Amino acid sequence: MTHPLSARAAMLAVVGLAAGWVPVSSLSAGEATTGRASIRICHGFGCHFRSELDLASGDEKRLAAMLSAGASSPRAERVAVSKAVQYYENRAVRVIGVRDQGKSTAKQLGKRGQMDCIDESTNTRAFLLHLERRGLLKHHTVNRNVTRGFLIDGRYPHSTAVLREKSGTKWAVDSWYEPTGGPPDIMPLSEWLKRGVMGVR
C-alpha cells in the first residue's frame, strides 16, 4: 500500500512476499459468488471482515445500461467501468454502513469498512468478474491482480485489479486512492507499475 505503514506492518508484508504469500485477491473469498447475484466485500485490511452484497434486478439493469453505453470502443468501456465501479462501491457502503477513507493507513487496521489495497483490489476484481460473467464486458477480460513495490525499491507493496484489452494491453483499475465511491485510477498497467515511489500516486 503506497502510504507510510507501521514498521510491523511493513515487516509482515516483506515476510509474506518472501514466503510466497498468495494475495487474498487470488482466492475464492473475493470472487463473485457463482449462481446468484451476490458479491463478497472485503474490509478491515487483508479481508479481515467479509460482508455480502446482494445485487437486485434494479442494480443489474443499471449496470447493464452503464456498460452498454460503453460498448462502442475499449476506451468507452473503460469509462463505463469507472462509473460502474463507483456505483458498486456506493452500494457496498450501504451494506457495510461505513465509508472507507482514501489512502488508508495502518491506523485503520482492523476497523470495519476501512480498506487497504488488498481489500480494494480484491473487491474491484470480484466486481469486474461479476460484469464479465454476465457478458457485460465486450472489449476486456479480467486478469489476476498485480502487486508492485518491495520496500527496497522505495515503495510499499501495493495491489491493483487488472483488465486486459483484446489488443493485449493491460489496464490497472486501482480504487485505493479515493474514498469509497470515488473514481478508480484506470491507466496502462505498464505505467502503474512505475509509480508509487515514496508513496507518490
Image: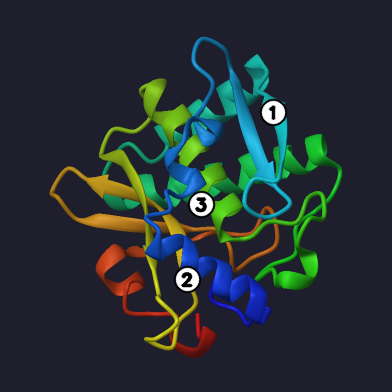
Q: Residue at x 55, y 54 (%)?
A: 118
Please name the amino acid that badge 2 sits on: Val
Q: Residue furthest top?
A: 35
Residue at point 55% right, 33% down? 29
**Residue type, mark 3 in image:** Ser
Q: CA distance from mark 1 to mark 3?
A: 16 Å
* Residue under the image location 54 percent in, 48 percent down: 83
On the image, numbered disc 1 is attached to which residue? 53
The residue lying furthest to the right in this view is: 97
Numbered disc 3: secondary structure: helix
Q: Name the residue tied to disc 3.
A: 121
Q: Is residue 80 left or right of residue 76?
A: right
Distance Cα–Cα, label 3 vs label 2: 19 Å
Q: Which residue is mark 2?
A: 14
Instruction: Please provide percent x and percent y for residue 109.
Output: 75, 62
Residue 108, horizontal then vertical, whole percent: 78, 65
| 2 or 1: tag closer to the N-terminus | 2
